[in-house]
Amino acid sequence: MKNIDQILEHCKELAFDLEFSYAKNWKSAQTDRVLIGYMPIYFPREITHAANALAVGILGTGDRKQIIKGDAFYQSYICHIPRGIIELALDGNLDEIDGFIFPSICDVIRNLSGTFQILKKGKFVKYLDYPQNFLSHIGGKFYKTELLHILHEIQKINNIEVTPEKLNNSIKLYNINQRLLKEIYNIRQEYPWRISFENLYYVVRAGMVITVEEHNKILEDVLEFLNINNGEPMDKIKVVISGAFCEQPPIGLIKTIELAGCYIVDDDLLLGSRWMKGDVADNTDDPLNALSEAYMNLSTFSSSVYSVGKPKGEQLVQLIKERNADGIIFAAPSFCDPALLDLPVMQKACDDANIRYISFQYNENTGQYKVIKEQVGAFSDSIKLWEDTVSS
Amino acid sequence: MSKEVEKEKSMVLQKEMVARLFDELSAANETGKKVVYTFVPGNLSELILAFDMLPVYPEINALQSGMRKLSGNYIREAEKFGHSEDVCTYVKCDIGMMLSGNIGPTGKKLPDPDLLLLSYTGCFTFMKWFENLEKLYPGVPIAMLHTPYQESGKITPDMTEYMVKQIKEEVIPKMELVSGKKLDEEKLNAIIQNSIEIEDLIVKIFDTTKNVPSPIDAYFAGVYYIGPINIGFRGTKDAVDYYTELLKEIEYRVENKLGPVTPEGVMEERFRLVVEGPPNWTNFREFWKLFYDHGAVVVASTYTKVGGMHDLGFRHDVKRPFESLAEYCMNCYTNLNLTQRISLLSKYIKDYNADGLLVNSIKSCNSFSAGQLIMMRKIEEDLETPVGFIESDLVDPRYFSFSNIKNRLDSFFQMLDQRRVILKDKTAVI
C-alpha cells in the first residue's frame, strides 16, 4: 500500500485542479483519446470509457476562483454553479474538452447547455434527457437512444467503434469502482474516525477527473488503510447530509460540520459516483441495454428523478436507519429548486419517523461559517444531551 | 385606476365560459364529474375533454390569486409549511391556497383532484410541484407524461415515439381508470378538429399586430386571449365561437386604425415592443399602465406561446392524433432551446417591426430566466436592436418594486426616443 498521506494529498490536488491537468495529459498521450465534460449529477461513464474517452466531472469553481465573467450571465436569483462553469469555459480551462454533457437535473443546467451551444464550446453539447418513465420499453428505449447519440458524437471525433466486449469491460471496471466505494462507506459508517469526511470527499471527487483504472487502485489503497484500526473515536453524532448533490459546498463548510461535532456517515455530495445500488450486468450481448436497465431499476433516489411509488422521504429515512445515523443535515445551495422543493416532503418524512434534522443553505463560495458552526454545534449537543436524558 | 374597463363582446364570452367551468368544478362532487389537475404548457385538453373530465390548472389558480392580491398570504402559508423563500412562487401560492382551504378564484372551494396529470413540459419545477401535491392528496393517481426537451432544436422520431407510448400506455389508461370510460377516438378527433380551427384563429389574431397601429397588445391583453386555448377550452365549440368573435372585433379595429383596448382606454401607439418572459400578476394593471403611459404597445411576446407555438406552423392532426398531441407538448415555448428562443425573438422583432425587445426576468422561473442575459446580448449584437431589462416575480408581491421598474422603463423609453432621433438624422444625412 502506498503512503496514505501521499494518496490523500494527490486526491486533494486532483479534486480541485480547475485546469484539469490530469485529463489533458491523459488525452495528449494518444491521438484518438477524447475528453467529455459532464455536469452533475449522474452520467454513465461506462460509455465514454468504452469509446476511449475520459469523462471529466465539472462541478463549478467552488471558492477557488473569483467569478467575474460568469456573473454577467446570470441574475442574482440563480444559483452559483453555472457562473463558475461559465467562468471556466470563458477562461479557457475547458478548451481541450471535446464534448459536454448536461444531464437533465433542473432548468438552470438545462439552459446552461444552451449557453454552451451559443458560445460554441466543444465539438458537441448534449443535454442528456433522462427518462422520467421507468418502463423498459418506453423510458428504457428512449434512454438507449440518448446514450447512442453520445456514442455517435464521440465516434465522429475519434472514429472508434464501441463493441459489446469493450462496453462490458467498462461496465466491469465501474462495477468494481462502485463496490469499492460502497465498502469504504460501510467501513466509515462503523469507524468514521479512521478517515475524515473531508479526505473521503477528496478521494471520491478525484475519481471524477481520472481514469477508472487509476481510481480503483486509489480506492483499494484507501480501503486497505481503513481496514487498519487507526485513530480514536470522538464524542460526535453521526449525520447524513442531503441536498448538496449539484453545487458543492466549500471544503470549509464540510470541515465546519465535522468540527462542530458530527461524523458525516453518508451524503449526496457526489451522488453520481455512487448512483447504482447494485452491479450493472456486465456480460450481456447488449450492454447498452444493461446500462439502461440499471438506470431504470438500480438508481438511487434523487431530487432530480421522479419518484414513482418510491417516495424519496421514505428512502431517506431508510438510509438514515441503514447508516445508524443520529440525524440529518439538509444542506442545499441557495436557489436550488430540486433540493429546496423536496425539503418539506423530506422533513415531513423525518418528522414521521422521529428523525432529527436541521437545515441551512449555502453557496459554493460561502466564506462565513460561524452561524453554521453554531447551528450544527447546537444540533449535535442537543442530540447528545437528549440521548443522555433518555438513557438516564 | 378606478376607471371602468371597456368590455367587448369577446370579453363577456370568455368571462361566461370561465364562470361555467368554475361552476362545474364547484358542483363536481354532486355531478360526479372527474377532476384533473394539470399544467398549461403541454396540456392535453383534447384528452381531458374526450373523457368528459374537468381541468384545474394550479398555475392559473396562482396567477388569479396574484391578481386578486391573495398570493402574498398563500406564499407565507407555504413558507410556514417549510418551503424556501428561494423557490417558485407559483408552487408556494398553490400549496398555500390548498392549505388555506383551496378556495378558487370565484370564491368557491375547488374540488380535490381525481387524477394528477403531470405534463412535464419545459419546466422541471412542475415535477417537484406534483411530487408535493402527491403528498397533499394521498392516494390520488398520478399520470406522468415526460416531454423531452428540444435540445438539438428539433423533434426527432424517437422523441415522438417515446411520448406517444407514454400517452397510450400511461396517460390514457389512467384516464380510463379514473373516468370509468374507454377512449372514444371519434369523439377525440371531433375535439381535435375544433382545436385546429382554434389554432388557425389564434395565429391570425396575434398576426394582426403587423398593422400600424397595432390593434391589440400581444402581452398584457394577449394573456387574456390565450386564456381559453390554454385552460381547457381548446377543442370546444365555445372556444371556436370566442376566437371567431375576438378576431372579428380585432379586424374591426384594424379597418378603423384603432389601437389596443387597455384598462386605461384605447392606446396611442408610440413604441412597438417584443417582450420576453411572463408578466407580473400581483400588480398587473399598474405594470400595464407603465407601458400605456409611454404609448408602448407589445406587438409580440413569448409568454403567450407557453401553451403552444402555433404561429410556427404546429397544428393538431386528426390523421395522427396521438403523435400530434405529443408534438404539441414538445412545441411549447419553454421546451425550446436557447438558440430557438433567440431565433423566435429575432423573427418577432423583424416580422412585427419592433423598436425594441424588453425582458421581464422573473425571479421564480428558472425555465424562462436562466439564459436570458446571453439571449439579450446575442439579439442586441445580431440585430442592433435596443434591449431593456426589468425584474419582477410572478405572484410574490415582495418582489414587485414599482419605482425600480418605472425607472428602468422610463430610461428604456427615453433611449428608444433618442435612438429614433438619431436614426432620423442619419437618414436625413444620407
Image (cartoon, coloured by chain):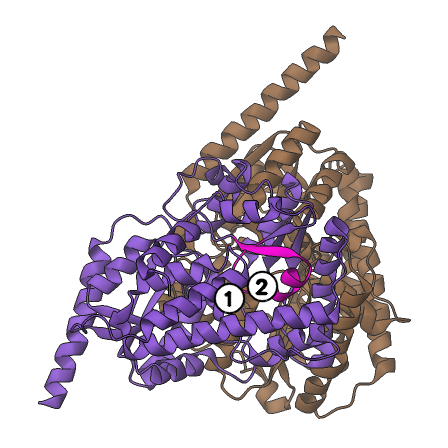
Chain colours: A purple, B brown
**Of A42 and A234, the residue lying toward us:** A234
Name the residue at 78% across, 50% down.
B205
Assess whether mark 2 and mark 1 are in contact (beta carbons under 8 angstroms): yes
**Of B69 and A384, the residue lying toward us:** A384
Dot 1 amino acid type: Gly
Name the residue at 53% across, 80% down.
A278
In x, y percent, where is residue B254? 79, 41
Chain name for mark 2: A
Dot 2 amino acid type: Phe
Name the residue at 72% across, 71% down.
A165
In x, y percent, where is residue B295? 61, 33
Residue A198 picture quarter: bottom left
Residue under numbered circle 2 = A43
Query: Counting other residues with Cα less than 10 Å from the Cα at mark 2, is it few (<14), some (14-19), or many (20 or more)?
Result: many
Looking at the image, is mark 1 or mark 2 earlier in the sequence? 2
| Position of A280 relative to B256 (above/below) | below
Separation (CA) of disc 1 from disc 2: 7 Å
Residue under numbered circle 1 = A272
A21 inside magenta stretch: no
Query: Where does the magenta region start and end?
Result: A37-57
* SS label for mark 2: loop
In x, y percent, where is residue A109? 55, 55
